[in-house]
Amino acid sequence: MSLQELETLLKDLQALPKECEWVEFKVNNGNPQDIGEYLSALSNSVCYHKQPFGYLVYGIEDGTHRLAGTSFHPQLEKIGNQELENWLATQLTPKVDFNIFEFEYSLQRFAIFKIDATKNTPVNFKGNPFIRIGSYKKRLDDHPERERKIWHIENLPAFENEVAKENATEEDVLSLINYPAFFELLKLPLPDNRIGILTRMLQEKIIVKTIKGYHN
């Protein structure tokens, strides 16, 4: 993710009215066991709620949502001789993808773990599955009704239906999409102005208008 995308994500998460079941805010608590349990809980929760990603955010104060910054540097942390990121990955079963982003915003440092939703199988950390219930991390085996649902959810959309870029500008849309080929494929006349091109792509659901730009 680019710095601009990370800053936008940070502000969007900060703007949430409260922590939800796929977002956890922390300031400096970098306990590896705790992080691993949250990776399991968030991956299982985003599957349960049919969300694409969960987020463990360092630098936002829980409750106030104040941008406090963090002194925790997950990409520098080690467990023995093993990097924290690699150690966490080896403790998760089945394997689930996650990424760690560290960046500065308004002269403060932040770290965001972006966690994929699991696919039909609950994710365990060190053999134990977790899930978020409200703003709390719980053992998944204490909530069998949610565990059953995860086993049966087919929640991930087909690649063709996923958003390639969020909140794109008009310039982004026209540079990223081969719109002449789109009009030629549909045997439509190519409009001679930007508004005409964007309007037609909106009508054909190639792009979606949002408050901040376009999804495509």
Image (cartoon, rainbow, N blue to C red):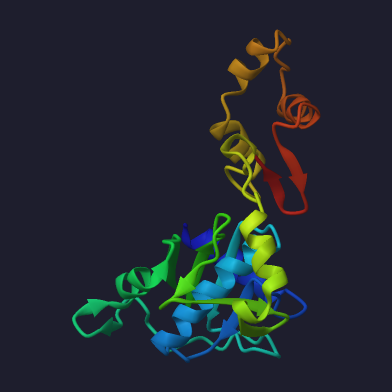
Q: Nearer the viewer, residue 59 or 80?
A: 80
Q: Who's the residue at 60% across and 34% down the image? A: 160
User: Height in image: 46 above or below 191?
Assistant: below
Q: Is residue 11 left or right of residue 105?
A: right
Q: Who's the residue at 70% across and 12% down the image? A: 186
**Which of the 4 quarters of the picture holds residue 47?**
bottom right
Quadrant into which the C terminus falls: top right
Q: Is residue 160 left or right of residue 103?
A: right
Image location (x, y in percent) of residue 112: 50, 72
Image location (x, y in percent) of residue 21: 68, 74
Q: Nearer the viewer, residue 156 or 67?
A: 156
The count of marks equals 0
Q: Who's the residue at 66% across and 39% down the image? A: 170
Q: Is residue 141 visible?
A: yes
**Which of the 4 quarters of the picture holds residue 56?**
bottom right
Q: Who's the residue at 70% across and 90% down the image? A: 64
